[in-house]
C-alpha cells in the first residue's frame, strides 16, 4: 500500500497544492497541516477487449470520471484506490477497476460526505459494453463511452471484425462511443475533454490498447483483445 505524507512550512497558512496518484492499487494520504477541505478527482480504468474465443469479440467500455469536495482535518488519514485497466482476453476480457477516495474507511465510499468513486468500463462476451459511471449520489462526473460489438461472417457481413473500445471520460466531458466497421478495423471512441483517453481499435490480429486515462481496449477476432488503460486520482487543497 502506498502512503503519501506532505509536510508544510511554519507560516500557519496552508498553501494550495495537489498530489496526482497514477500507480494502480490502494494507498493512504495524510492531510497536510492546516487543511480542512480536499477536492477529489477520480478516473476509472478502461475495460479490456475480448478475443476470438468470445461470441463476437467486443471492445471494453471506457472508464468514468467523478469529482467532489470533502471536509477533513489536519493529518487525517485518507484512503484511496487507483484503478488499473482491465486485461484483454482470448475469450472475455476483464472489466476496468474503480478509482475511489474515502476519508472514513479502506473501501469504496457509499456516502458523498466521505468521498467519491469512478467505475471502470465493462467487458463481456457479446454486445456493446457499457462505459463506467460515477457516485455516490451527490457526486459530479461524466460517463465513459460504450464499446462497439464485433461482427462475424455468420451475421452476413464482409468481416469478421472485432469491436472498438469506448473512450474514457474526461474531467469536462463524456467519453465517446466506439463504432464498428463492416470489415477491417473498428474505430475506438474519442476520449472525453480534456484528459480522457481514446479507446483502442478492434481488429483481426492487431487490436490496440486503450489510451490513458481510462480508454477501453479493442477486441480482437483473430487473437487476444487488448488491455484497457489505467485511471488516476488527483487530490488538491
Image (cartoon, rainbow, N blue to C red):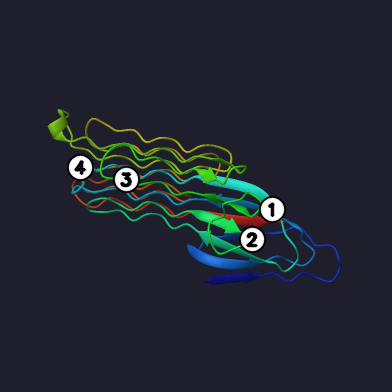
Describe the element under mark 3 as helix, strand or loop: loop
- What is the number of the mark on residue 208? none
Residue 218, compared with residue 25, is above or below; it is: above
Describe the element under mark 1 as helix, strand or loop: strand
**Seen in the image, is 77 located left or right of residue 230?**
right
- What is the number of the mark on residue 55? 4
First in residue order: circle 2 vs circle 3: 2
First in residue order: circle 1 vs circle 2: 1
Badge 2 crowding class, 10 Å Cα cut-off, few under 14, some 14 to 19, many 20 or more, is many
Give x and y (percent) for residue 99. 51, 55
Q: Residue at x 33, y 47 (%)?
A: 123
Q: Determine which quarter of the picture holds residue 56.
A: top left
Give x and y (percent) for residue 27. 55, 67
Q: Are marks 1 and 2 in contact (CB under 8 Å)?
A: yes
Describe the element under mark 2 as helix, strand or loop: loop
Task: Between residue 190 and residue 52, name the one nearer to us.
Answer: 52
Badge 3 crowding class, 10 Å Cα cut-off, few under 14, some 14 to 19, many 20 or more, is many
Q: Are marks 1 and 4 in contact (CB under 8 Å)?
A: no
Q: Which residue is mark 2?
A: 103
Q: Which residue is mark 3?
A: 218
How far apart marks 1 and 2 lie (CA) works out to 8 Å
Furthest residue toward left: 154
Q: Which residue is mark 1?
A: 70
Amino acid at each position: 500500500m502506498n502512503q503519501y505524507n506532505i509536510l508544510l512550512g511554519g507560516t500557519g497558512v496552508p498553501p494550495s497544492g495537489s498530489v496526482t496518484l497514477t500507480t494502480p492499487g490502494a494507498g493512504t494520504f495524510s492531510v497536510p497541516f492546516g487543511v480542512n477541505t480536499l477536492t477529489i478527482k477520480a478516473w476509472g480504468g478502461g475495460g479490456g477487449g475480448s478475443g476470438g474465443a468470445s461470441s463476437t469479440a467486443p471492445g471494453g467500455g471506457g472508464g468514468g470520471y467523478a469529482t467532489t469536495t470533502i471536509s477533513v482535518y489536519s493529518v487525517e488519514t485518507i484512503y484511496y484506490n487507483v484503478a488499473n485497466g482491465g486485461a484483454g482476453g482470448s475469450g472475455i476480457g476483464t472489466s476496468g477497476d474503480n478509482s475511489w477516495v474515502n476519508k472514513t474507511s479502506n473501501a469504496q465510499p457509499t456516502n458523498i460526505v466521505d468521498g467519491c468513486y469512478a467505475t471502470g468500463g465493462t467487458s463481456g462476451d457479446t454486445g456493446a459494453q457499457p462505459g463506467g459511471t460515477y457516485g455516490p449520489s451527490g457526486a459530479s462526473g461524466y460517463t465513459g463511452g460504450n464499446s462497439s460489438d464485433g461482427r462475424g461472417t455468420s451475421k452476413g457481413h464482409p468481416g469478421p471484425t472485432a469491436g472498438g473500445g469506448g473512450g474514457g471520460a474526461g474531467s469536462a466531458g463524456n467519453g465517446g462511443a466506439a463504432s464498428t466497421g463492416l470489415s477491417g478495423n473498428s474505430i475506438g471512441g474519442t476520449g472525453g475533454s480534456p484528459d480522457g483517453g481514446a479507446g483502442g481499435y478492434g481488429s483481426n490480429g492487431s487490436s490496440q490498447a486503450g489510451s490513458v486515462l481510462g480508454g477501453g481496449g479493442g477486441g480482437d477476432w483473430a487473437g487476444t483483445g487488448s488491455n484497457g488503460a489505467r485511471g488516476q486520482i488527483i487530490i488538491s487543497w
